[in-house]
């Protein structure tokens, strides 16, 4: 157990340049506490002590803002950066050395039974606000952009962006004009607003044209 804790601390220090000491991670990082509490809750869960498992996980959620169902299966080295609003469902499986940012949901669609939540391979990164929904796999070393909504499998070594998410890089080679960026990704709401603005401007031009014709007829 002590060796596992040291591994978790080292993993966080490696990926977060803001860390100043081991003690800071041990006492002040919600990610460290949430994963530590999850492992305790999972121990009870796999032994059939479901109430105790949920009690531990719910106390951890209130303390950290990170909700990890005790039934999830999580490998070593999970780093949840910032962490607020992260939700990890019961049948989620997460490989080694994965990184999740704030407001990530690894959830279900409500249409599946049994295995309802996603499986993340090793070294997967899921950006802030992303939603990965359904019982499919995100391959090893893949990246999900911030605010993406992933509804189908992503192969290994890929980058996926957008709503719904699509693969834009595979093995480091761009397969579209898009690119992974925590900021500059397709925003469907902005795109709709832009189209509506253009439509309104065109309609306004038509109205102005009609008004001009009416004014000329009145003068005539």
Image (cartoon, rainbow, N blue to C red):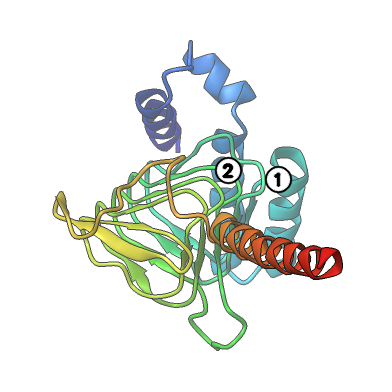
> Relative to 48, does residue 197 appear above or below in the rendering?
above
Residue 183 vs residue 70, the one in the foreground: 183
Number of marks present in the image shown: 2
Q: Earlier in the sequence, mark 2 or mark 1?
A: 1
Q: Position of residue 141 (x, y in %)?
A: 25, 51
Question: Is 213 left or right of 107, judged from the image as shown?
Answer: right
Q: Position of residue 21 (x, y in %)?
A: 48, 12
Q: Residues within 10 Å of mark 1 (few under 14, many from 20)?
A: many
Q: Mark 2 and mark 1: span between their CA atoms?
A: 16 Å
Q: Position of residue 49 (x, y in %)?
A: 67, 67
Q: Quadrant of the N terminus?
A: top left
Query: What residue occupies the far front of the structure in this picture?
Result: 220
Q: For the residue labelled by badge 1, is the local secondary structure a helix, a strand or a loop?
A: helix
Q: Position of residue 27 (x, y in %)?
A: 62, 22
Q: Residue under circle 2?
A: 102
> Relative to 158, does residue 133 appear above or below in the rendering?
below
Q: For the residue labelled by badge 2, is the local secondary structure a helix, a strand or a loop?
A: loop
Q: Residue under circle 1?
A: 60
């Amino acid at each position: 157990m002590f060796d596992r804790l040291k591994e978790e601390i080292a993993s966080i220090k490696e990926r977060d340049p803001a860390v100043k000491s081991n003690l800071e991670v041990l006492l002040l990082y919600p990610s460290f506490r949430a994963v530590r509490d999850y492992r305790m809750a999972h121990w009870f869960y796999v032994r059939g002590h479901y109430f105790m498992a949920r009690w531990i996980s719910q106390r951890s959620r209130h303390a950290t803002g990170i909700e990890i169902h005790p039934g999830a299966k999580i490998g070593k080295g999970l780093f949840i950066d910032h962490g607020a609003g992260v939700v990890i469902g019961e049948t989620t499986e997460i490989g080694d050395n994965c990184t999740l940012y704030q407001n990530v949901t690894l959830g279900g669609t409500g249409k599946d039974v049994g295995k309802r939540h996603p499986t993340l391979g090793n070294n997967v990164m899921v950006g802030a606000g992303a939603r990965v929904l359904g019982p499919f796999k995100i391959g090893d070393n893949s990246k999900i952009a911030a605010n993406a909504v992933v509804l189908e499998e992503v192969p290994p070594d890929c980058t996926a962006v957008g709503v719904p998410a699509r693969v834009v890089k595979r093995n480091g080679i761009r397969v579209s004009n898009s690119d992974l960026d925590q900021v500059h990704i397709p925003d469907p709401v902005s795109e709709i607003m832009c189209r509506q603005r253009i439509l309104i401007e065109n309609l306004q031009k038509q109205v102005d044209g009609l008004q001009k014709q009416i004014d000329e007829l009145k003068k005539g």
